[in-house]
């Protein structure tokens, strides 16, 4: 960030609080372009005060880039379906809100794993292991443990969710119910996966008393847990 004096920072805060629509939109655009996180509190307060659609849209864009992990929990918890995932210019998926449909219920905030990080410093049990099947281990990224756990879940009439390549060689989460399909989920994919309707499908299977194994990034798992909001 450019080194600014106290007066310059205070001027930006005054613009956020008292400026006209065009001034605020221009300021927020500059903050986004410069990845400037210093005015989060002021913009958060403004979001719930302003009636300007243009200002609200820019504030959402600001926080989307600043904090969002793209988990889709907000998309599926929204009662009016006013949120959808859209690609940015680099191809990453972020939520976009239709402000005319938004009823300010704030459920999207309640379910956000980034806004609701839980750190209770609890010690957890840690296990180390690997698959004894050398062929599976060679075709895996982390010792082939996933295959062992997944096969057990399937043997219990469960469902396994994981990242796979589709026909366009894009990565998306899919559900598999047979051992023969597990190979699609093996191996790491170092790009963002499309979750689409994975969270609602996981919930549906759990409500039908089926075991579910979900594999994904830490933030995807956290988003799913916040969306489910209970243990099954």
Image (cartoon, rainbow, N blue to C red):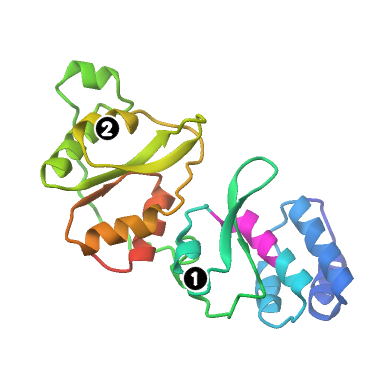
Residue 30 located left or right of residue 78: right
Q: In the rendered view, would you say 96 is above or below 23?
A: above
Q: Which residues are magenta?
A: 59-68
Q: In the rendered view, would you say 133 is above or below 177?
A: above
The verdict on residue 61 being magenta is: yes
Residue 145 located left or right of residue 42: left
Q: Nearer the viewer, residue 37 or 141?
A: 141
Residue bearing mark 1: 78
Q: Which mark is residue 180?
A: none
Q: In the rendered view, would you say 213 is above or below 66?
A: above
| Residue 62 image offset from top left, x and y in percent | 69, 60
| Residue 137 image offset from top left, x and y in percent | 24, 21
Residue bearing mark 2: 181
The crowding category of the residue bearing disc 1, from other C-alpha atoms within 10 Å (few below 14, some 14 to 19, many at least 20), is some
Q: Secondary structure at mark 2?
A: helix
Residue 179 located left or right of residue 85: left
- Would residue 172 be seen by someone viewing this image from the given angle? yes
Q: Nearer the viewer, residue 60 or 36?
A: 60
Give how far apart the Cα atoms at labels 1 and 2 are: 32 Å
- Would residue 122 be seen by someone viewing this image from the given angle? no
Q: Residue at x 20, y 62 (%)?
A: 208
């Amino acid at each position: 960030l450019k080194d600014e004096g106290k007066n310059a920072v205070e001027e930006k805060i005054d613009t956020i609080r008292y400026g006209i629509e065009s001034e605020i939109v221009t300021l927020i655009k500059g903050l986004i372009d410069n990845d400037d996180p210093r005015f989060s509190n002021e913009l958060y307060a403004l979001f719930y005060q302003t009636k300007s659609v243009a200002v609200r849209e820019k504030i959402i864009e600001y926080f989307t880039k600043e904090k969002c992990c793209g988990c889709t929990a907000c998309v599926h918890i929204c009662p009016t379906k006013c949120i959808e995932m859209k690609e940015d210019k680099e191809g990453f998926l972020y939520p976009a809100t239709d402000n005319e449909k938004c009823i300010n219920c704030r459920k999207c905030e309640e379910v956000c794993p980034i806004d609701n990080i839980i750190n209770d410093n609890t010690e957890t049990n840690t296990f180390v292991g690997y698959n004894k099947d050398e062929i599976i281990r060679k075709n895996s990224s982390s010792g082939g443990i996933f295959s062992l756990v997944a096969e057990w879940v399937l043997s219990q009439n469960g469902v396994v969710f994981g990242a796979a390549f589709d026909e366009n060689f894009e990565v998306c989460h899919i559900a598999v119910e047979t051992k023969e399909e597990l190979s699609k989920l093996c191996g790491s994919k170092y790009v963002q996966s499309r979750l689409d309707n994975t969270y609602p499908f996981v919930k549906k299977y759990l409500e039908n008393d089926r075991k579910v194994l979900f594999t994904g990034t830490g933030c995807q798992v956290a988003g799913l847990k916040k969306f489910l909001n209970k243990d099954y």
